[in-house]
Image (cartoon, rainbow, N blue to C red):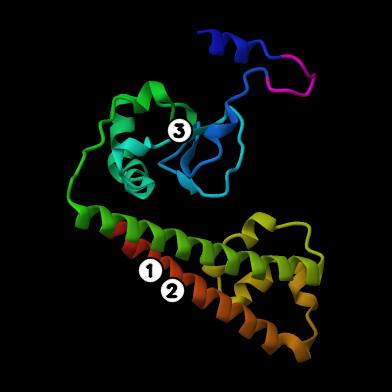
Amino acid sequence: IKLKIKFKTNKKYWYALNRPRQDKWFKQERIITPQISYGCNMTLDKKQNYHNAKVYSFLVKKEYGVDVDYFFAILNSKVVWFFLKSTGDVLRGGYFTFTTEYLKLFHIPYTANIITKTEISTTVNMLLQETNQLNNISSEFIHRIITSFSIEKNLKLLQTFYLFSWNELVSKIPELTKINPQKQDEWEMYFENHKKSIINLQLSIDKLEFIS
């Protein structure tokens, strides 16, 4: 109780958090989730990032002897989302709150099957690796397009560029009509290569999510 009171009244510095957390909680691999989300949008934090009260962290006790990947696969599953929709309070837009109050009612099964744990951990690592690869490819294309043509609008549309053909994208983003005709084929090929990579990765990710 004293520790809790000390945290709540820690106002030594004007820029300090009113309710800070112990630094050691952030110095470990953990699962993090938005406090309010539509669907399970959890991820693994392996870089010891700090966050505010709008984000929740799940810490795995070492004495359980279970990789955090195992819990991540379960907590980020459609089963948990179904559970929350069935037991939680819906917010505007169909969003739900991912806090202790609602998640503590969900019991995670314990398995002593080493093969099952290993398979789940392997699948999770593959998912994270391919998702990171997809994001990097997408960011590379978007950054080059924005900087090359000084695009200030339609940035949200660019996030899903791979859903369009090259001609459709050009028709939706006026700046792309200024491409030098001699460079047209080069840019279209650049677009197609990135689009193909993203689609293939997304298919692989969807397959892994189905398996998990």
Of helix, strand and loop, which one carries label 1?
A: helix
Residue bearing mark 1: 204
Label 1 to label 3: alpha-carbon separation: 27 Å
Task: Give whichever of discs 2 and 3 has the lower sequence position.
Answer: 3
Residue at 64% across, 81% down: 190
Residue bearing mark 3: 95
Q: Give the number of the mark in front: 1 or 3.
A: 1
Circle 1: residue type: Ser
Q: Nearer the viewer, residue 69 or 95?
A: 69
- Marks 2,1: beta carbons within 8 A: yes
Bin the neighbour count of mark 1 within 10 Å (Cα to Cα): few under 14, some 14-19, many 20 and up. Answer: some
Secondary structure mostly taken by the magenta-highlighted segment of the chain: loop
- 16 part of magenta stretch: yes
Q: Give the number of the mark in front: 2 or 3.
A: 2
Q: Which residues are magenta?
A: 11-17
Circle 3: residue type: Tyr
- The tag on residue 200 is 2
